[in-house]
Amino acid sequence: MKGRDRPTPAKRLRWMHDRLADAYGPQHWWPAKTPFEVILGAYLTQNTAWKAVERSLANLKGRGALTIDRLRSLSLNDLQKLIRPTGFHSRKAPAIKAFVAMLDEEFSGSLEKLAATPTAPLRRRLLALPGVGPETADAIMLYALGAPVPVADEYLRRIVERHKLLSPPPGRNPKGYESLANLTRQAFPSEPEGKHLRLFNEFHALTVAVGKAHCGRAAQCAGCPLAADLQNVRPSD
């Protein structure tokens, strides 16, 4: 295939979304019943598998602490014990408490008031909290607060690197994260703004699905819905 005939990285990423949507169907992600449970999951899933998150959430549910009011009254020591299955509990528990304190002090304890904050200042405020990096902030904004922002996780980074969509490859750092998020935005340029929330939601969930099945630490390309795109990768790229 001639170089000038190759689709752009953004068009290839959009093709990937469409192909994954055909292969896996709607994902109905994030797995939670309330926005606050989403926020807890976003903190707990850092550097751990979702199975461990489920155990911690089950512990919190057993104590009735999946609500802001009940978690607010939970001692830091008790919170650390309940979320121990996710690891890093001595760091994650204070971070969760700091989120609740911010919500109380600045937004009268209301997630609705927090969600009403414009996207850019909302993201800056979340990033200023302890234990909140770009992926956690964007997951909270997209899934809990209804802000149309893309989430760029490790699965997407692997896909982009292995399909050579960005040069240089995105690193595991804020600059690399933003390059992945920007590429995702560019993949949906003609979609009405009102559709971005659903598109970013589904695309993140679909990359998780294909990542778990095919794009782990070792690539398993056989049977992958995205394998056909590898023809767009030059050996010299």
Image: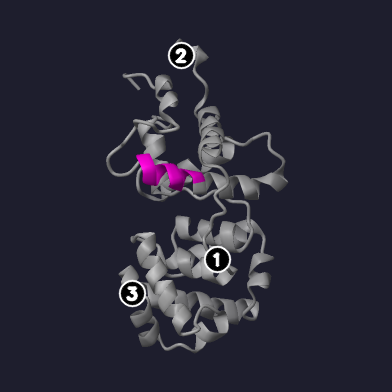
Whichever of callouts 1 and 3 sits on the residue coming sooner in the sequence is 3
Question: Residue at coordinates 34% horizontally, 60% vertically from top-left?
Answer: 47
The percent position of residue 36, horizontal first and vertical second, equals: 56, 71
Q: Which sits in the foreground, 226 or 98?
A: 226
Residue that protrudes farthest toward the top in the picture: 2
Question: Residue at coordinates 41% horizontally, 50% vertically from top-left?
Answer: 174
Residue, disc 1: 125
Do the CB atoms of the residues marked 1 and 3 lie less than 8 Å apart?
A: no
Q: From what the image shows, is residue 103 above or below residue 209? A: below
Indicate the quadrant containing the C terminus: top left, top right, bottom left or bottom right. top left
- Please, what secondary structure does the residue beneath circle 2 have? helix
- Please, what secondary structure does the residue beneath circle 1 have? helix
Name the dominant secondary structure of the magenta segment: helix
Q: Amino acid at mark 3?
A: His
Q: Nearer the viewer, mark 3 or mark 2?
A: 3
Q: Amino acid at mark 1?
A: Arg
Indicate the quadrant containing the N terminus: top left, top right, bottom left or bottom right. top left
Which quadrant of the view contains residue 46? bottom left
Q: CA distance from mark 1 to mark 3?
A: 23 Å
Residue, disc 2: 3
- Please, what secondary structure does the residue beneath circle 3 have? helix
Q: Which residues are magenta?
A: 206-214
Q: Nearer the viewer, mark 1 or mark 3?
A: 3
Question: Residue at coordinates 54% horizontally, 77% vertically from top-left?
Answer: 102
Question: Residue 78 lies in magenta, yes or no?
Answer: no
Position of residue 169 in the picture relative to residue 129 (left or right): left
Q: Which sits in the foreground, 64 or 168?
A: 64
Q: Amino acid at mark 2?
A: Gly
For residue 36, the mark is none
Whichever of callouts 2 and 1 sits on the residue coming sooner in the sequence is 2
The percent position of residue 219, horizontal first and vertical second, equals: 31, 37
Question: Residue 208 lies in magenta, yes or no?
Answer: yes
